[in-house]
Amino acid sequence: MRVVHHRVVDTSVVFPHRLGPPYKRALKTIASDILQLIIQEDIEGHDSKEDASTCMRLMLHKVVHN
């Protein structure tokens, strides 16, 4: 979505694709690369709580390590 807002974080903007726009990294890929965390493996679809929790963990990682 490439959302930029003072209260919303788009992880595809914070963790850009190595090829740059228009390419975007998927949350699943970012979580795997940065946190070594496997998400979105449920056969019933995405879990919004898991996605939100992963986004928060990614942003905390960014703040601590950058």
Image (spheres, rainbow, N blue to C red):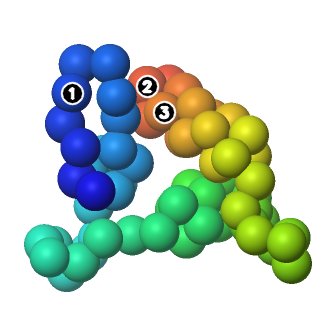
Say which residue appears at 85% left-offset and 72% top-offset: 44
Question: Looking at the picture, how far across and down is residue 40, in whole percent?
Answer: 74, 66
Check disc 1 and report the residue beneath it: 5
Q: Nearer the viewer, mark 3 or mark 2?
A: 3
Marks 2 and 1 sit apart, C-alpha to C-alpha, by: 17 Å
Q: Which of disc 1 and disc 2 is earlier in sequence?
A: 1
Relative to residue 52, is residue 62 drawn left or right? left
Local crowd size for mark 2, using a 10 Å CA cut-off: few (<14), some (14–19), many (≥20): few
Say which residue appears at 86% left-offset and 78% top-offset: 43
Question: Looking at the picture, how far across and down is residue 45, in whole percent?
Answer: 76, 70
Local crowd size for mark 1, using a 10 Å CA cut-off: few (<14), some (14–19), many (≥20): few
- Contact? badges 3 and 2 (CB < 8 Å): yes
Mark 2 residue type: Val
35 up-or-down from 43: above or below? above
26 up-or-down from 5: above or below? below
Camera-nearest residue between 44 and 10: 44
Mark sitting on residue 59 = 3
Q: Nearer the viewer, mark 2 or mark 1?
A: 1
Check disc 2 and report the residue beneath it: 63
Q: Residue furthest top?
A: 7
Q: Nearer the viewer, mark 1 or mark 3?
A: 1
Marks 1 and 3 sit apart, C-alpha to C-alpha, by: 15 Å
Question: Looking at the picture, how far across and down is residue 14, in whole percent?
Answer: 30, 46
Mark 1 residue type: His
> Can residue 44 be spotted in the picture?
yes
34 up-or-down from 54: above or below? below
> Can residue 61 be spotted in the picture?
no
